[in-house]
Amino acid sequence: MAQLENIGAAPIPTAVLAAHEAVVEVLGSEKFVDAATAAVESLTHVDRFYVFDICDNGRQMRPLIHHTEPEKPYVAQGMYVRQFLPTDPVKRAVDMVDDEAPATWCVRVEPSDIVAERYRQMLVSSGIVERVSFLRPVRHGWRCMTVARRSESGTFGDQELDVLGGFARLLMPIIERNDALACQKPLGTEATIDELEARFARLFPALTKRERETCARAAVGMTAEGAALDLGIGVASVLTYRKRAYHRLGVCSAYELSRLVMR
């Protein structure tokens, strides 16, 4: 059975501070995701690392950081939300704990804890032996930082989880700040991706569908990795579509792009 622990009051190990400082130094830049990934790897080895938000009581998922081994089977976001998330131990943990409590929760999961057979088999076939998620409540739901290891890497030790948990407690609150700095827009500004795609289509009909999709996600502060996960395409493709769109629109940054449609 999945293990759930409140780590909100645990001391943050000093080993985490240098890794966190390296991430803070690149807040608001496209180096943020790479810096966060490198920071995790500097603390301990992981085979998968990603951060996402669970919104609307589990009916929506917002990818923020995605870094994994190349051969990982792709799971479309919509499929995960509809078929896998409702019975995922992460969602069960969210339903169990008080979202008003200023706490961070650690959820340790083995493949046998996964109820959805197809999802469980995907983990088993990839050799995953343990998946650990760190959860904290945010304004619109829950934020989750997840790491996982395959059989050749072994399960996580308690000291490793202490370090990863400390880093998660420092990283998750600054992701929203990074998005805001990347777009240079107020944190409270709300615009759905569908609305932004429609605005790009109306204002700039020369853009292709993929260019509109990548632009909309860049405008809300989504990283190239997050957009790739959301759209089900490669990161290189996202960067290509975005570069073409920037050239068509005569902009050089996500900030300039967002100003075209967020007025």
Image: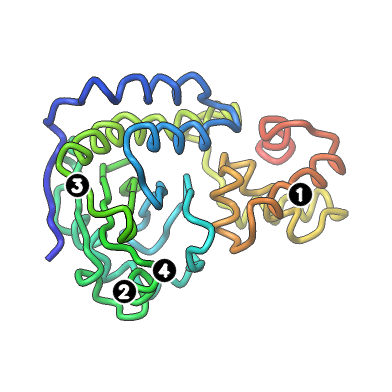
Q: Contact, CB < 8 Å: mark 1 with mark 2? A: no
Asked if residue 11 lies left or right of residue 168, the reply is left
- Neighbourhood count class around disc 1 (C-alpha, 10 Å): few under 14, some 14–19, many 20 upward: some
Describe the element under mark 2 as helix, strand or loop.
Answer: helix
Residue at 34%, 77% in the rendered image = 121
Q: Contact, CB < 8 Å: mark 4 with mark 3? A: no
Describe the element under mark 4 as helix, strand or loop.
Answer: helix
Residue at 11%, 47% in the rendered image = 5
How far apart marks 1 and 3 lie (CA) works out to 37 Å
Reading the chain from its start, which is encountered first: label 4 or label 2? 4
Residue 36 position in % (x across, y down): 45, 34
Q: Nearer the viewer, mark 4 or mark 2?
A: 2
Nearer-the-camera pick, 115 or 204: 115
State which quarter of the image contains the N terminus: bottom left
- Determine the image quadrant of residue 9: top left
Q: Is residue 173 above or below residue 239?
A: above
**Residue type beneath disc 2:** Arg
State which quarter of the image contains the C terminus: top right
How far apart marks 4 and 1 lie (CA) works out to 26 Å
- Neighbourhood count class around disc 4 (C-alpha, 10 Å): few under 14, some 14–19, many 20 upward: some
Describe the element under mark 3 as helix, strand or loop.
Answer: strand
Residue bearing the label numbered 1: 240
Residue bearing the label numbered 3: 106
How far apart marks 1 and 2 lie (CA) works out to 34 Å
Q: Contact, CB < 8 Å: mark 4 with mark 1? A: no
**Residue type beneath disc 1:** Thr
Q: Nearer the viewer, mark 4 or mark 1?
A: 1
Residue bearing the label numbered 4: 80
Nearer-the-camera pick, 193 or 241: 241
Reading the chain from its start, which is encountered first: label 4 or label 3? 4
